[in-house]
């Protein structure tokens, strides 16, 4: 049985997502949920960076292009937010790629557009 990565931090992050979802409901634009999460993370004291450019490397050379996950929480967990009727394979692939090209071990994909419940998935970097 493998050990669950960062359980306390994940619980706090997902708890904040539930708070936002329960108060705001589904169906709003993604940007609204991003802003609400920034407020909730600040309120809870969860350390985060929003849309922080992350370096990319190819053959040990840094690329000029960067990518910006929605949130990096606790300097070790990627949080990607969606506001869709349901998550797509492309959304899952996006966070898996983010994990594969970074040092991060854990990512959460959270969909605020799903009803009647918040949709969420957890991904571990297996490389």
Image: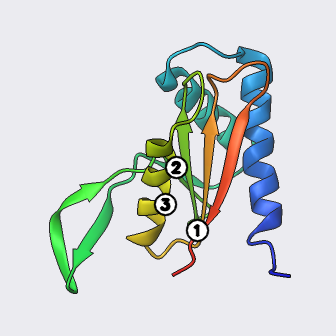
Q: Which mark is residue 12?
A: none
Q: Residue at x 29, y 67 (%)?
A: 55
User: What crowding class fits label 2: few (fewer than 14 Cα within 10 Å), some (14-19), or many (20 or more)?
Assistant: some
x and y, in percent, of residue 35 in the image: 54, 28
Q: Earlier in the sequence, mark 2 or mark 1?
A: 1
The answer to whether 50 is drawn above or below residue 34 in the figure is below
Q: Residue at x 52, y 49 (%)?
A: 92
Q: Secondary structure at mark 3?
A: helix
User: What crowding class fits label 3: few (fewer than 14 Cα within 10 Å), some (14-19), or many (20 or more)?
Assistant: some
Q: Determine the residue located farthest toward the bottom in the rendered image.
A: 60
Quadrant in the rendering for residue 62: bottom left
Q: Which residue position holds label 1?
A: 76
On the picture, is 55 further left or further right than 4? left
Could you tell me which quadrant the N terminus lies in? bottom right
Q: Which residue position holds label 3?
A: 96
The answer to whether 29 is drawn above or below residue 17 in the figure is above
Q: Which residue position holds label 2?
A: 92
User: What crowding class fits label 1: few (fewer than 14 Cα within 10 Å), some (14-19), or many (20 or more)?
Assistant: some
Q: Is residue 50 visible?
A: yes
């Amino acid at each position: 049985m493998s050990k669950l990565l960062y359980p306390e931090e994940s619980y706090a992050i997902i708890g904040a997502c539930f708070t936002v979802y329960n108060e705001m409901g589904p169906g709003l634009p993604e940007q609204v949920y991003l802003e609400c999460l920034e407020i909730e993370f600040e309120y809870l004291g969860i350390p985060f960076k929003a849309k922080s450019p992350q370096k990319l490397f190819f053959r040990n050379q840094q690329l000029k292009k960067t990518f910006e996950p929605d949130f990096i929480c606790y300097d070790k967990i990627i949080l990607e937010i969606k506001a869709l009727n349901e998550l797509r394979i492309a959304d899952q692939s996006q966070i898996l790629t983010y994990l594969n090209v970074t040092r991060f071990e854990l990512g959460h994909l959270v969909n605020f557009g799903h009803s009647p419940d918040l949709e969420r998935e957890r991904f571990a970097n297996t490389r």
